[in-house]
Image (spheres, grey):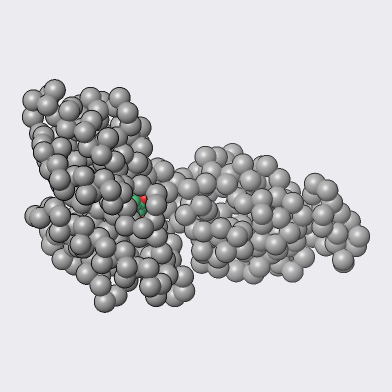
Amino acid sequence: MHDGTAATLRIDLGALVANYALIARQVAPAAVAGVVKADAYGLGAAEVSHALLAAGCRHFFVAHLCEATALKPHLPPDIPLYVLNGLPPGAEAACAALGVLPVLNSLAQIDAWAAAARTIGYALPGVIQVDTGMSRLGLTPDELAMLRDQPHRLDGIDLQLVMSHLACADEPDDAFNREQRDRFDAIADQFPGVPRSLDNSGGAMATGVRHGDLVRTGIALYGGAPHGDPNPMRAVIALDAYILQLRTVPAGAGVGYGLTHRCDRPSHIATLSVGYADGWPRHLSGRGSAYIGGVRAPIVGRVSMDSMAIDVTDIADYLLYPGAPVELIGPHQTIDAVAAQAGTISYEILTRLGHRYARIYLPAPVAAADQRSGKA
Ligand SMILES: *Cc1c(COP(=O)(O)O)cnc(C)c1O
């Protein structure tokens, strides 16, 4: 029976765990952290974190303190949960009470966290991020020099990690990766004995480099290509829309808002149950694809808010009926392929996945997960 949702989103936690294991082998002896910001890139932070925990993952990153607040109850109390975007002004007490680790991105944040530790009367765990050339977040070279001269500013902070972020990790041959790695190593030497973290998915899957103590992976866990083709990761999601209605139109008929598509032959048109309000890119109007029985059916006309049209003239009749499933993401069309056609990246396709989908989590094999956590 149809449940009235816009589409079915299958999330394969077995594939997620297999991707985790592949990255873990690649970066060993470094540990692999799960980056579960933005609701685990749209896949569900609680479900994804549970599966990763069972697979042996012991570190989790979110972007905002509000995300940490939501996820913290789902993690064992001793599992570190880091907040990438830093310590919001005035949130020191809340952050300390929640027991999460802020990524301290400036001297001001370091001072505020140290002051909070003095007020509370015990050391607070934290992370320092340094800017090694991306000019986004982290201490500047000037701030690092000041900190070198005034190390007491870290008093009260139990430094768990020094980290930075790669600007070009998706292109492993880019010379800037080497430059950032060298800068990071030099800066990290300023914090002897503190574990180091630099790599995201692209950095973690780079060969011939050292991966420090902890890599922070998001997209590769979720099946996105760390470096373009070929993609060594297993697909984690599959998205099936439904046919809402079918019609046969004469040559010359217009389709959709603005009648931007004109049929050049008598055509069968299927209206699908997914639109841009579900995160399906409107940029795929007149250019994207759906697949039925493994055969391509082009998107015709504009993607609407709640629906879109595909040309099914070349699809076998028995596959065409109201309620029939239509592959939007799956074996014939990866998240990277959809992203490339839409002029974006797989990250954006995932993080915009709709809220009107039936979400089905395929569990990871229990035995395999147990073995892995035993090894870790
Ligand atoms: C989002 C993010 C990551 C994860 O990046 P992926 O490319 O998805 O692996 C790692 N580190 C930082 C600082 C991030 O913002």
Query: 10 or 200, which lies in front?
Result: 200
Look at 28% across and 48% down and name the residue there: 142
What is the quadrant of residue 78 in the picture?
top left
What is the quadrant of residue 375 in the picture?
bottom left
- Which quadrant of the figure shows ligand 1? bottom left
Look at 21% across and 57% down and name the residue there: 187
Percent position (x, y) of residue 79? 18, 43
Query: Which quarter of the rendering shows the N terminus?
Result: top right
| Res 83 seen here | no
Look at 30% across and 25% down and name the residue there: 90
Percent position (x, y) of residue 130? 28, 51
Compared with 88, 375 (above or below) is below
| Res 374 seen here | yes
Percent position (x, y) of residue 29? 15, 66
299 sits left or right of 201 in the view: right
Query: Which quarter of the rendering shows the C terminus?
Result: bottom left
118 sits left or right of 199 in the view: left
Look at 31% across and 39% down and name the residue there: 86
Query: 243 or 73, which lies in front?
Result: 73
Percent position (x, y) of residue 262? 86, 59
Most extreme residue toward the top, as rendered?
119
Query: 280 or 153, which lies in front?
Result: 153
Query: 291 or 321, which lies in front?
Result: 291
Compared with 287, 65 (above or below) is above
